[in-house]
Structure formats: C-alpha cells, structure tokens
Image (spheres, helix red, strand yellow):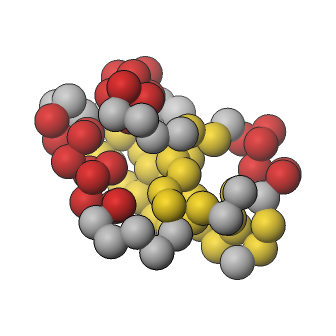
Amino acid sequence: AELLAVQVPAGTQGAMQRVLAALVGGEVNIEYLYGLLARLEGRALVALQTDDSSMAERVLRSRGFDLVHQEELGDADDA
C-alpha cells in the first residue's frame, strides 16, 4: 500500500475530521497517520497509510481534497 499525503487547509476547524469522515464513508481503513511539518501552498500536510490506497485516493479526490505525490514534497516549505 502506498503512503498518501493530503493537503488540509491550515486553521480550518474540522478539516481533519472531514478527511477521516470521507475515508470512513468510503469504507477505507486507516492503518496510521501523522502530520508533516512541511506546508505546501500554505496548507498543512497529513500523511496516511490505508488498507487500500487507490480507493482512499478516489474517495478523497471525489470529496475535493488535494493529494500530494512524493516528488511534490520537495516544493513544500518548513512550517
């Protein structure tokens, strides 16, 4: 399974809850997650490992979340 990074609007109350609710609604199990210190375009990044990364990606994109690929993390700024 692939590690996914999701952009979460910084300072937006409930943003992480919406990410988790989207995954639960898509019946995607979260194995682990952690926040990254870096930010991309002013938004916080959360890395997560799921039991089905392709389904997680489809679910999150369909709910309007932006995913970040590993090569894009080089463009991130330190928090």
Picture quadrant of residue 23: top left
Can residue 4 be seen in the rendering of this structure?
Answer: no
Q: Is residue 65 left or right of residue 26?
A: right
Q: Residue at x 60, y 61 (%)?
A: 43
Is 61 placed above or below 41 here? above
Picture quadrant of residue 70: top right
Q: Nearer the viewer, residue 33 or 23?
A: 23
Picture quadrant of residue 64: top left
Q: Which of 2 and 40 is in front in this view?
A: 40
Q: In this view, does 52 lie to the left or right of 65?
A: left
Q: Nearer the viewer, residue 70 or 19?
A: 19
**Quarter occupied by the C terminus:** bottom right
Measuring from the top left, give residue 58's x and y in whole percent.
Answer: 39, 22
Is 76 placed above or below 57 here? below
Q: Is residue 65 left or right of residue 63?
A: right
Measuring from the top left, give residue 41's x and y in whole percent.
Answer: 71, 57
Can residue 63 be seen in the rendering of this structure?
Answer: yes
Q: Nearer the viewer, residue 10 or 36?
A: 10
Q: Is residue 26 left or right of residue 75?
A: left
Measuring from the top left, give residue 11's x and y in whole percent.
Answer: 46, 75
Q: Residue at x 43, y 29 (%)?
A: 61
Q: Which residue is drawn at 15% across and 35% down?
A: 25
Q: Which residue is drawn at 56% across and 39% down?
A: 67
